[in-house]
Every structure is written in C-alpha cells, then in structure tokens.
Amino acid sequence: MSTDVRVRFAPSPTGPLHIGGVRTALFNYLFAKKHNGTFILRIEDTDQNRYVEGAENYIVEALNWCNIPYDEGPSKEGNCGPYRQSERKDMYRAFAEELIEKEAAYYAFDTAEELAQARSNAEANKETFIYNHNNRLSFTNSLTLSKEEVQERIDRGDDYTVRFKPELKTLNMYDEIRKGIEIDTSLLDDKVLFKSDGMPTYHLANVVDDHEMKISHVIRGEEWLPSMALHVLLYESFGWERPKFAHLPLILKPTGKGKLSKRDGDKMGFSVFPLEWKDPKSGEISTGFREDGFLPEAMVNILAFLGWNPGTEQEIFSLDELVQAFSLEKVNSSGAKYDPEKAKWFQQQWYVKQDDAVIGAAFAKALQEKNISYGSQEYVNMVAGLVKERAVFTEDLFELAGFFFTAPDSYDEKNAKKSWKEDTNETMSKVIEVIKNTDDDSAAGLSTAVKGWITSQEIGFGKVMMPLRLALVGSLMGPDVFEIASMVGKEETVKRIETAMEKLG
C-alpha cells in the first residue's frame, strides 16, 4: 500500500444525506488535509433497487456547501476511477472467482424458498439461523456438489451466490479509535459476496474498491464496526495489506437514547439534513440546515464537535483551524448527543463574525420579500451591524430591527403602563423641541442635546429615555436609542413621538 494518505467517503445514493454522513465526510476531509492527502468520493450504488434519483447530486452539493469538496470522484476523475460502483461492476466477478480458487469462497445454489425454510426451522427450535461452518455442508453448494455438477448448474443458468468461507481462528484487529478488538471468526456467517446477475454485494465491492483506490485509512461510522472482521478477513484472503480502520461514534438523539433520526428532528423542530430535500416520489419536503439559515462555517463547527474534542477550551474553529487541530486520537468512542440549542449557539457565534455587508444583503432580500421599502443597501448594512450580535439567523433581523424600516403601530402594553405617565406628553413635547433645534443629527449629537436638556431640567433619565424608546421602537428593546433616532432621521423621530403621544397620552 502507498504511504500516501488516501481516504474516501462512500455514501449510497438512496435519499438525502443525514448529518451523520456529512460528519463522516468532514472527518475524512480533515484527516486528508491534515496529512496532505487525498479525499475521495465514491458512490456505492450496487443496490439499484434502492437508488433514488437526485441523491448523488444532493451529496455533491452538500459537500460543496460545507466547503469540503472531494479531490477525486464523479466528474473529478483521478487514476482510480470510475468512482461509481455501478460503473465498476464488470471487475468484481474476477475477484469473486479468485476467492473461490483460493478456497476462501464457494458457489451456493440455495433457493430463497430453501433458505426461508431453514430460517423457519431454526425459529421453531428457538434458534437464530446463521449460514456458516456449522451447517454449510447441509446446503446445496460447491462444497457438497462435485465440480461437474457445479459447472453444469452454472452453464444452464441456475441462480447462485458466492459466499465467503471465513478461516476459523481468533482474529486480532486494531481500530484507531477503539484500539484492540478480538473476534472469534467461528461466530461469523458466510456472507454473500457476489450474485449470478453480475452484481457484487457491498462487502466485496467495498473491499475491492478500497484496495484498487489505494485507500490508506477507512474512516466510517460505527454502524460498520460489525463488518470490520469480514473486511479484514477478505484482505487477508486476497493477500492484500489492510488499511487502517477508524469507526466514528454514533450521533445520538438530544435525549442521548438512540441514533438521531429524521423523526426526532420532525418532532423537535430541527433539521437532520444539510440541505432541503424533496422526495422525487412522494413530493415530501424535508428541511435542511442551509434553508433553516445556518451558515456552512457553523455547520462544520457543529459537526466537528460531535465525537471529537480538541482537548482545549476553544470551541470556535474555522475549517483551516480544524484541519490543523484534528486527529483520530481525539475522536471519542462513545456516542455524541446532538444538542439543537448548542447548534444555534455555534450559528450565532459565526453569524456575528459575518461582515455587515454580507448580512445586510441577506436582510435586504428578506425585506423585499415582505414588500418593505428600505432605502439604500448601505442603510440596511448599518442596521444589520447594529443588531447582528443578538441574531442567530437572518430571519431574526426583522424582529430585532423592523422598527428601522416601519414605525411601530402598537406598543408593548406592560412597558407602556410602566413608562408613559400623566405628565409624559408634556415632557415629550419638550424633547421634540430639543430634537428639532439640534443641528447635529448624529447619534452623538442627539445624545448630547437630549441628555444635556434632561440634566438641566433635573429630571430622571428614565422619565425621558423609556418613553422615547417606546415611541421609536414600540417596546423597550433595541440598540442605543440615539442610534435609532439618528438612523431613522429627526423628522421620522419627531413623527413617531407625536404618534405615541396621541395613542398613549
């Protein structure tokens, strides 16, 4: 095997990519880039019955959105293609036959009915049916038939499978995350590797492709851990050097009990897919992180901490920082609980980092959709800069800053009772005069004028500042009240105070 680091993400195009799959792709990407290696995308589509139209494009788009594009794969051909297993199917038969010649596999002609009967008989005896060394000689296969009979069946077109025959021994394996693993191979079943229709099963195709593509490290989800022994035995049977294995922990439900599923997201109101997905058959639409407003930087940061920890207090990492910090040694073996609120925290941290112009452009688009006039893009950018620290998503901006574009048409009842007293109209009339007579309409200029007047009148600041904010905003929220007054302008500020006096006085 080459000493170069070559890793692969090998999803099946059977539907939308779960965030667990994106996490697997991310960890492969980080490992590859950390070691100046190659990140490969291989589409494992041998099971054509489960193939879903559009799923492959979805996978590619999701990786690109997360800024973790593959180096080799479909439409990025390297020297080890093609990168769709369906386009490689003609090569697998020879490998299956090689195993038969080495007596590491055999032809099996058992019908579906015969196998169903064997399972039924086992259930009747309260046993679990396993096709392996204990009973393989009681079935119709090349171990019980003569060579002539086997060839005759093949020649006449009988359906068959090629089953693996594991060597009986104690198998010692090593996982980069879980360390040493010992397996008694007598407990394994004789897995089907190849079918007479010319299609390999996942196990044969997976091992052959990893070898042919010179994969140095197999980094995949924990659900494949039970297959590790079979895959290691296949490498041994072929006489190939095995890659290093690393099985990533499961992503668990927010409760910590069980694997995170789409149903959990639907029930609790969050996405489990990176992008929106429309089922081509049912038309059902599933939401995605992107459409929910998450930034790709936040998505990557969220997924990185699901099973990995840098061992420091730092939580906010750029992709480049993750590449430098990542190692398989710091990946946990236990499941990682998905926390929707923590995900929003990561999003908020990254949202604040965005340039005001970037947030402003998205905000302007949202205002257009609401048919709200916003003046110049520069104005929208300034508003975005004032309130972004309290926003998590772009959709939050209007709730936080809508008053910069439309005057309040109602006032928070509790705050109105608290801040608008019998003499407030009289006080606010004088504030209007101060504002009108102020030449400097900047936030600093308005602040100096109004606060100076308050001090000169020897009245409490709350007696002016709370009603002023209520008049401009409709509640007691928002950034500095003089920033608001300066942004909406003196004329609009006076108009809003007068409206509040009319409605609340």
Image (cartoon, helix red, strand yellow):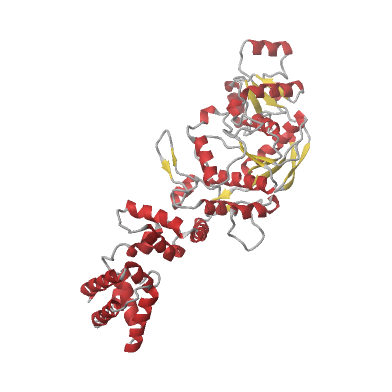
Q: Is residue 414 visible?
A: no
- In the image, 166 versus 365, the foreground residue is 365
- In the image, 181 versus 346, the foreground residue is 346
Query: On screen, 105 above or below 145?
Result: below
Residue 426 locus on image (x, y percent): 23, 82
Residue 248 locus on image (x, y percent): 64, 47
Classify the position of the N terminus by image quarter.
top right
Residue 270 locus on image (x, y percent): 46, 51
Taking the view exactly as shown, the residue that stands out farthest to the front is 439
- In the image, 183 versus 476, the foreground residue is 476
Question: In the drawing, does residue 7 fall left or right of residue 426?
Answer: right
Locate residue 424: give its quadrant: bottom left
Residue 184 locus on image (x, y percent): 75, 38
Which residue is found at the position 41% from the left and 60% from the top? 381
Question: In the drawing, does residue 426 fall left or right of residue 334?
Answer: left
Locate residue 425: give its quadrant: bottom left
Question: In the drawing, does residue 22 fall left or right of residue 402?
Answer: right
Classify the position of the C terminus by image quarter.
bottom left
Which residue is found at the position 65% from the left and 27% from the top? 192
Which residue is found at the position 62% from the left and 34% from the top? 126
Count how many numbered circles sit on residues in the image: 0
Locate residue 84: give its quadrant: top right
